[in-house]
Amino acid sequence: MKSTINLFLLFIISVSAFAQNNLEVEISTKRLVRDVYFLASDSLGGRKFPHKGSQIAAEYIASEFEAINLKPIPNNPKAYFQEMPVTKLDKGETRIFANKIPPVAGFYYSFAATKPISDSLTQPIKYWGKSTPPHHNLGDTIVHIYGKTMDDAMAHLEEIASKTDAKSFAISLPTKRNKRFIRRELTASRYSYPNSMLIRSSSEWLYHHLPKTDDTLRVFMFNKELTGDFFEKSIKSLNKASAKVGKENRSTSFPISQVTYKTDFFIKTDTLFDKNVIGYIEGTDLKDEVIIIGGHYDHLGRMPDGYCLGADDNASGTAGVMELARMCAQAQSNGFEFRRSIVFMAFCAEESGLNGSMYYANNPVFPLDKTVMIINMDMIGRPDNRPNKPGYAYTTPIGFGKVKRPTKRLLRKVDRQMSNTEFYLKQDFPENIMWLMGSDHFPFHRKGIPALIVTTGTHADYHKSTDTPDKINFRNMANVLKAMFVLITDIATEADKYPLREKE
Ligand SMILES: [Zn+2]
């Protein structure tokens, strides 16, 4: 660790530009160091849900919110935690034997069932084209469904399931689509968030799209290699035969083959809770209007190259949220009047697809039409694109409308004032497009809320085990927060200058 002396400096800000003079607030790089080193420590294991490290991080943030007397979420028994249900899909052993070789899920097949199941089957597979098969003895048959798309196939499956006693299904799609769908399995998470933006695994997709019924339904998809082994035909000729039946709309059964296979599978579901951490400072005459200061606290956990500790991504932004909370709380207790309320949010599950912020945007604690702006900090500790140069941060406003001009003007002013501290605020982020959808401001932006991204940008250690706390520039972080504090106080007091967006 170098330049230790600099790391422990205290900054004093005087915000004299406002009606309320003599505001003195401390920014402590010492606290930033403490928070970043704790959040990015080995024992937190990269803060990935459901590892206990993500839970410890959430509790650490909440206990700090409590220590500085932030108000918890109103009428919430969990105080600072906004809990979000996460469905856990456990796949036990799913083994399908083809020529005695157990194939790999994701390469060769995908499978889902509506209920926990442990089973072993020997059944013929039959095909009825687009029509509904006759309602007899289908409990001992795997009904084959060929669809142009998954939606197409599932609609047919649902119809057959509702009109017959069929319980087992095999779906196939045009060859390429079939393969692509099954391969989702390999990269997908076992944890399923509400409204997830990420593509779900194939088995999870199947699980969610199977009809809700008291029966235990099961559905298979086979990739062409495996289909060949089972059907002694290529999937192409199989699909061709199936399509022909479909076109002629034949209603008689069409046995594809009499196949024997064994599966031994088990799917169980469990509901866990991931959590956003939320606390706020209540404003005065405009307390129903809120400004959100956010940053995600989760990271990637264990990756092939080791634990990703996520010091910059995003222990830095999380520490920033906490430090701004302390600064605002201190300002308020020194008599500074925030007219609007300031809400501090540490988001969970950003890395798995903006799930925490998405959940908040769909289940807001404070009305979205009274939310003036979100300031989202993601990676604010690594201004090292410019070694030995002054520090900086990019501040990119998205969807600002009327508040864009005053915000940009203020940021320019802060930039000028801070240039003597060797720090610059840049307003035209080169990776603008990537960042539009890339972090927790995006779900807010989609709801029409002005969103300011604050970041020092990506670097060579991004999403690697080498994103460690010793590389963080704490002085730069302190400068970023100093600038944001000035902006926050302005937005929280100058309501006319930063109006709420107009309702459509
Ligand atoms: Zn991030």
Image (tube, rainbow, N blue to C red):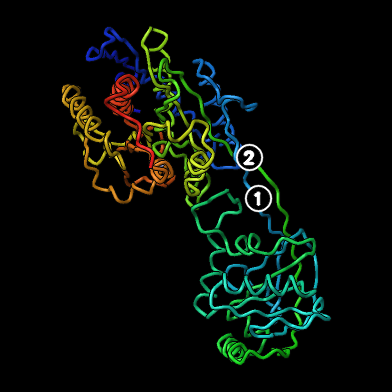
Q: In the displayed image of the protein, which residue is found farthest to the front?
A: 504
Residue 236: x and y, percent?
A: 55, 87
Q: Is residue 4 visible?
A: no
Quarter-of-image position of residue 101: bottom right
Residue to which mark 1 is pinned: 88
Image point (25%, 31%), residue name: 407
Comparing 15 with 379, the one in front is: 15
Residue 221: x and y, percent?
A: 63, 73
Using the numbered discs, state the Cα–Cα distance from disc 2 to disc 1 in whole angstroms. 10 Å
Mark 1 Cβ inside 8 Å of ligand 1? no
Q: Which mark is residue 67?
A: none
**Label 1 is placed on what type of residue?**
Lys
**SS for callout 2:** strand
Q: Quadrant of the N terminus?
A: top left
Image point (34%, 34%), residue name: 380
Residue to which mark 2 is pinned: 273
Residue 173: x and y, percent?
A: 56, 78
